[in-house]
Amino acid sequence: MLILFTLLYRQTDKGRNSAPWCRHELLQMDALELPADRHRGWYLSLMAPNTKGPTFAWLDPSRLYCNSKALEDCVKDLISPFLNDTIDLVAGIDAMGFILGASVATVLGKGFLAIRKAGHLCVATDNQNYSDYTGKEKTMEVRLDVLRPGVAAVAIENTEGGKWIKENYKFSHCIPEELQSQIDQKRLDSFKLLNN
């Protein structure tokens, strides 16, 4: 089985929820400190909103990656549905998927396959067109010599593509149910507290 890491984008839900971990004191904490309560999804409060405009993703997870326990807990939550499966390889899509995918591969003791933007691999590849978070049409490519049937995926948003993945593949995500509508709206209530 191959586990694929990517983020899917598009607003779909107008609901609004608040999670107990989205408190002001968590957002004021140093990115390297740990909260007393490390329940599922606590690390999402380390993410920051896009402040540079529509050519960038709607959130920035890099603070989460800087905190070793946040990254560890996130990876643990992502791989939990696959613990009893035979995993051959972990793949990640350029570029956020590289960090999570490589982290998961390391924890599982498996190799990592980078799915790149077209034109970056110098070996035989297969290509797939897609729309990125800005709506721009792009092409990604993957080397052919290591792929085998059987893919699982990480899908965090309930977009058309995310729903299709959830209906057709075994999937995982690290989003607590009470935050799903916020993710689908490309926002987190915790973002409001970053400006205070």
Image (cartoon, grey):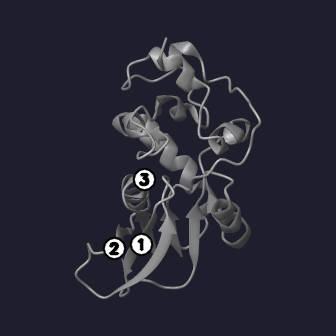
Q: Position of residue 80 (x, y in %)?
A: 60, 54
Residue at disc 3, secondary structure? helix
Q: Earlier in the sequence, mark 3 or mark 1?
A: 3
Residue 116 or 27: which is nearer the viewer?
116
**Of pointers 2 and 3, the one earlier in the residue sequence:** 3
- From mark 2 to mark 1, how far is it between C-alphas? 5 Å
Residue that numbered label 2 is attached to: 118
Residues tagged 2 and 3 counted as in contact (Cβ below 8 A): no
Q: Is the C-beta separation of discs 2 and 1 under 8 Å?
A: yes
User: Residue 13 has which mark?
Assistant: none
Mark 2 secondary-structure assignment: loop
Number of numbered labels in the structure image: 3
What type is the residue that disc 2 sits on?
A: Ala
Q: Are marks 3 and 1 in contact (CB under 8 Å)?
A: no
**Which percent across, then down, holds residue 60?**
43, 39
Q: Earlier in the sequence, mark 2 or mark 1?
A: 2
Q: Please tell me which residue is depicted at 57% across the width and 24% down the height of the picture.
A: 190
- Residue at the disc numbered 3: 100
Q: Residues within 10 Å of mark 3 (few under 14, many from 20)?
A: many
Tag 3: amino acid? Leu
In the rendered image, the vertical position of residue 9 relative to residue 39, given as above or below: below
Which label lies toward us, 3 or 1? 1
Q: Nearer the viewer, mark 2 or mark 3?
A: 2
Q: Is residue 179 above or below residue 190?
A: below
Q: Nearer the viewer, residue 84 or 131?
A: 131
For label 2, the crowd category at 10 Å Cα-Cα, with few meaning under 14, some 14 to 19 and many 20 or more, is some
